[in-house]
Image (cartoon, rainbow, N blue to C red):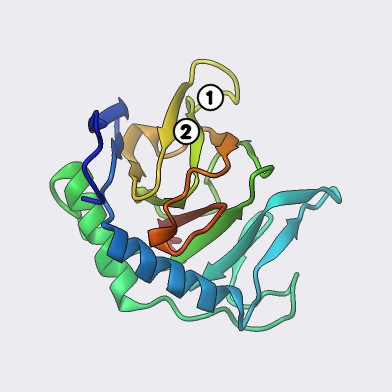
Amino acid sequence: MSGEALFPRERAVVAPGAVHVPGWLSVERQRELVDACRAWARGPVPIRHTVLPGGGVMSVQTVCVGWHWQPYRYTRTADDVNGARVAEFPDWLVELGRSALVEAYGEHQGYSPDTALINFYDGAAKMGMHQDREERSGAPVVSLSIGDSCVFRFGNTDTRGQPYADVELASGDLFVFGGPSRLAYHGVPKVYPGTADPATGMSGGRLNITLRETGL
């Protein structure tokens, strides 16, 4: 656990198959992940603001490992950035993903993530409601938060609107969604600047690391 809170936050099943585990990552493990993300952000495909097909630019900055995500498909090379092949997906991230599923569900179900999408949010960045549906695999998505806290809006599988639940994700939190909730709409309407613990290596902003099985 990453530290004793005055009022410990409780583990919660937000929806069927969607589990929030506060403080799952130790401060030391968070710092290791921050160091890894900084290295990936430098290349071979550098972190960038993704340009959407309609010309809009995402407010978050993204870098990928294993497979490159570009709206709305996966490729091995970052043809929308510099044409380079993305960094290889390391075995230790597979093990981390499996450990996350054991924590959330009691078993890892043979989970073999092969891509990570790493999003960096500054204080003004947001993420609109969307589904993670470019993967051919129906395996769960593992989401890890480091740095500033945020509001994570977790909705339903039919519409971007209500019903949804707003969950505060803090540094070190784990959120897993699979099964009936695998295609639930979700987003980040707000980040709380200045809430990061500098001991994690994040002096400001929020890192979100999502591990996925592409099925490709």
Task: Give the number of the disc on residue 102.
Answer: none
- Please state which of residues 160 and 24 is positioned toward the viewer in this rendering: 24
The residue pinned by badge 2 equals: 184
9 vs 60, nearest the viewer:
9
Query: Marks 1 and 2, how far apart in space?
Result: 8 Å
The residue depicted at 52 percent of the width and 60 percent of the height is 117
Q: Is residue 28 above or below residue 44?
A: above
Compared across the picture, whether 105 is left or right of 171 comes to left
Q: Is residue 68 visible?
A: no
In this rendering, position of residue 165 left or right of residue 13: right
Q: Count residues near mark 1 (Cα–Cα under 10 Å), then give few for <14, some for 14-19, many for 20+.
A: few
The number of numbered badges drawn on the structure is 2
Residue on which disc 1 sits: 158
Tell me whether circle 1 and circle 2 mark residues in contact (CB < 8 Å): no
The answer to whether residue 172 is above or below residue 92 is: above
Q: Nearer the viewer, mark 1 or mark 2?
A: 2
Depth order, front residue of 103/216: 103
Please tell me which residue is depicted at 34% across the width and 50% down the height of the picture: 172
> Residue 134: image x %, image y %?
55, 52
Q: Does the rendering let one see residue 143?
A: yes
Going by the numbered disc 2, the residue's amino acid type is Ala
Q: Residue furthest left?
A: 106
- Disc 1 marks a residue whose amino acid type is Asp
Residue at 61%, 81% in the rendered image: 43
Say whether residue 196 is left or right of residue 49.
left
Instruction: Indicate the position of residue 61 as horizontal and vertical percent values.
Output: 66, 58
- First in sequence, mark 1 or 2: give its number: 1
Q: Position of residue 19 (x, y in %)?
A: 29, 36
